[in-house]
């Protein structure tokens, strides 16, 4: 594999000794922390208030840039109170391989943020019962987790998951 490909997929940042589950999802370590307030990642460059946490409950196109330039954005996030991991979408009509990929990307970015000294609250997402096979991989037990209800308000069956 050439260096350009390695960099494109952030394989140079992947630590195969810090993974879990059958899909080798990067691990995030436990934290018990509750931010007083959260601000969307899309406002990070427009605020001077570093006493708030940053969330990624946004459209994927808004957070794709963190995947494309992780070191750059992790440096921007270092001064904030805490950061939730990116919430890449898991849609029930998406191929399972894409859902695993999005889970992997969220955990890798979270792991990198932790290694940079940021307080990281992992975001957990799922689409349906079939995603339970991987959606909890890499998450710590007995830890603060962030869960979004965006996208589950349309159908009662989704909400009950």
Image (cartoon, rainbow, N blue to C red):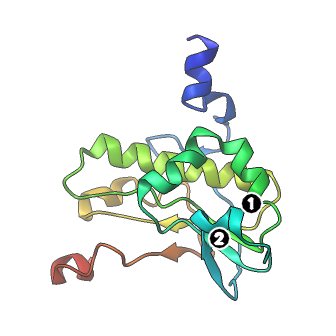
Quadrant in the picture for the C terminus: bottom left
Where in the figure is residue 9, as x and y percent of width and height? 54, 30
Q: Give left or right: position of 81 versus 148.
A: right
Element at badge 2? strand
Question: How crowded is the residue under tag 2: few (<14 C-alpha within 10 Å), some, or many (20+)?
Answer: many
Q: Which residue is labeled 2 in the image?
A: 54
Q: Residue at x 68, y 35 (%)?
A: 13
Above or below: residue 114 compared with residue 46: above
Kindly indicate the quadrant of the structure image that contains residue 50: bottom right
Q: Residue at x 69, y 67 (%)?
A: 46
Total marks shown come to 2
Residue at mark 2 to residue at mark 1: CA–CA distance: 8 Å
The furthest residue to the bottom: 36
Q: Give left or right: position of 103 versus 131.
A: right
Q: Which residue is labeled 1 in the image?
A: 77
Kindly indicate the quadrant of the structure image that contains residue 145: bottom right
Element at badge 1? helix
């Amino acid at each position: 594999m050439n260096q350009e490909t390695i960099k494109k997929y952030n394989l140079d940042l992947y630590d195969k000794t810090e993974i879990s589950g059958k899909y080798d999802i990067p691990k995030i370590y436990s934290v018990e922390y509750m931010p007083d307030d959260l601000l969307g990642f899309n406002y990070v460059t427009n605020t001077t208030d570093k006493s708030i946490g940053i969330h990624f409950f946004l459209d994927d196109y808004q957070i794709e840039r963190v995947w494309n330039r992780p070191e750059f954005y992790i440096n921007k996030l270092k001064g904030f109170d805490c950061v939730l991991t990116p919430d890449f979408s898991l849609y029930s009509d998406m191929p399972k391989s894409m859902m695993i990929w999005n889970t992997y990307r969220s955990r890798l970015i979270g792991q990198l943020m932790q290694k940079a000294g940021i307080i990281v609250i992992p975001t957990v997402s799922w689409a349906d019962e079939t995603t339970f096979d991987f959606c909890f991989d890499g998450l710590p037990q007995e830890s603060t987790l962030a869960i979004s209800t965006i996208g589950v308000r349309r159908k009662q069956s989704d909400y009950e998951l």
